[in-house]
Amino acid sequence: MSRDPTDAAGAPSAARQGRPLRARAPARPLAGRVRVPGDKSISHRALMFGALAVGTTAIEGLLEGEDVLRTAAAMRALGAEVERLGEGSWRVAGRGVGGLVEPEDVLDMGNSGTAARLLCGLLAGHPLFAVMTGDASLRRRPMRRVIEPLSLIGARFAAREGGRLPLAVEGTADPLPLDYRLPVASAQVKSACLLAGLCAPGVTRVIEPEPTRDHSENMLRHFGATVRVADTPEGRVIELDGQPELAAAAVRVPGDPSSAAFPLVAALLVPGSRVAVENVGLNPLRTGLFTTLREMGAALRVENERIEGGEPVGDVIAEYAPLRATEVPPARVPSMIDEFPILAVAAACASGVTRMRGLAELRVKESDRLAATAALLAANGVRAEIAGDDLLVHGLGGPPPGGGTVATRMDHRIAMSGLVLGLAARAPVTVDDASFIDTSFPGFAALMNRLATAGGERPGPEGRPGEGGPIAPP
Ligand SMILES: O=C(O)C1=C[C@@H](OP(=O)(O)O)[C@@H](O)[C@H](O)C1
Ligand SMILES: C=C(OP(=O)(O)O)C(=O)O
């Protein structure tokens, strides 16, 4: 019998006490072939669409990070049967579109913006009452962006000042189909509208100013819904035919490119390294970081490219090479929205000034990532400026000084970026709370330590932090 990690996800974990970690330059290059955990976006969606389908959806490679476990617990609370068979192997017996039941208790979405916003869409079209909350980071994040369109279909919301969690939602038995132009490029808002549109009769239409990740569209089709997508002068138009019968469908979750970014960038920055990450999702709406790194002179190769479950997948190989600065245009931002902290670390080691343009959305992630990224670099001897919505990083053309402490600000990507900086810097870098890494990348420190060990460091029994690798508690 396998332990079901959702049992542990209901309450703030005792481990969430502030777990500092420190990273230093490894004695040898990073080397090896690894796999990273399943894609977070696809994992949330597999559980949600599985809960809305008729029949049993088999999911392999599900990310068992805290964010996704919150979604699993919420689907159970809404009446779906969610079962863990083994590592990454889950089954969801769905209730059909419109068949979710009222939850008995508050839904706690932890640290996860995706879980909270997509769930709003799911609830809005069902005649039920629900209350949702999250951790201190999620309670600061804007929810009005989903409340506004979902109110148009007839759902009613009450939220804290500024449209923040906790919120209460009263879904509607007779949702209207939406015709909505997204005010911001957001896959979460788009997906919330589409999830609500499943319960509405007629055609739900969403227009996005810039294309964002299309995992919801792909998965809706995979479960049997009719989705039409057209690029027009006004933006990308997505149409969903309402009230389909979704049929359970097997989902194989690829490795998360946003997680793969950390070992791959580490390999680009630690002299002599060569790292392969296998089975990485390569949806073109997710790979803006790889495009940017190549422009900077990175040696990045993709092998074994194939289509799996409707999504492109491949093995990505990174080798150390000196990097040079580049400029990221605003239109590329949605395709690498979560990768700016780690790109900033790469830019700190590159020669010249890297400019990343149009990053306003970074202000409303798990932390204000514009401020947190600039502070991460400044604490470690790298000049970074915020100019309007742009971030400028003055690269040192080699290892940054390091030696600082990074304030994690409840943000997993800031924690992992700080630790990668420590692997590349002259002096060790400390992050004040690495526990948030478990939201998206359980086993991160162990995986990075294994790569250092394969490169020649003294091995620990299981490659755990503190067992000989360069990432360990201070
Ligand atoms: O739809 C998704 O799964 C996500 C969309 C993005 O958020 P926004 O929609 O707020 O840009 C991204 O930052 C997040 O990590 C995952
Ligand atoms: C922004 C992120 O996630 P979410 O919005 O789901 O909290 C992220 O994983 O970087």
Image (spheres, rainbow, N blue to C red):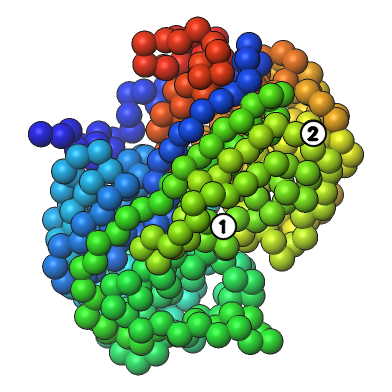
Establish if 241 lies above or below 129: below
Q: Using the image as rendered, state which of residue 71 and residue 173 is in the foreground.
A: 71
What residue is shown at x 46% (from left), y 16% (from top)?
Answer: 465
Image location of residue 474, percent across then percent down: 55, 10
Q: Are marks 2 and 1 in contact (CB under 8 Å)?
A: no
Answer with the quarter of the image where residue 368 lies.
top right
Against 462, residue 202 (above or below) is: below
Q: Residue at x 72, y 20 (%)?
A: 425
User: In the image, what residue type sits under mark 2?
Assistant: Pro
**Secondary structure under the numbered disc 1 in the rendered image:** loop
Q: Residue at image x 65%, y 44%?
A: 300
Which numbered disc covers residue 363? none
The answer to whether residue 129 is visible is: no
- Point out the image quarter for the N terminus: top left
Q: How many dots with numbers?
A: 2
Q: Nearer the viewer, mark 2 or mark 1?
A: 2
Residue 286 is tagged as: 1
Which residue is most to the front?
A: 304
Q: Which residue is mark 2?
A: 322
Q: Residues within 10 Å of mark 1 (few under 14, many from 20)?
A: many
Does residue 17 sit above or below 122 in this rendering?
Answer: above
In the picture provided, is 244 more to the left or to the right than 352? Answer: left
Marks 2 and 1, how far apart in space? 24 Å
Q: Amino acid at mark 1?
A: Arg
Specify whether residue 331 is in view: yes
Element under disc 2? loop
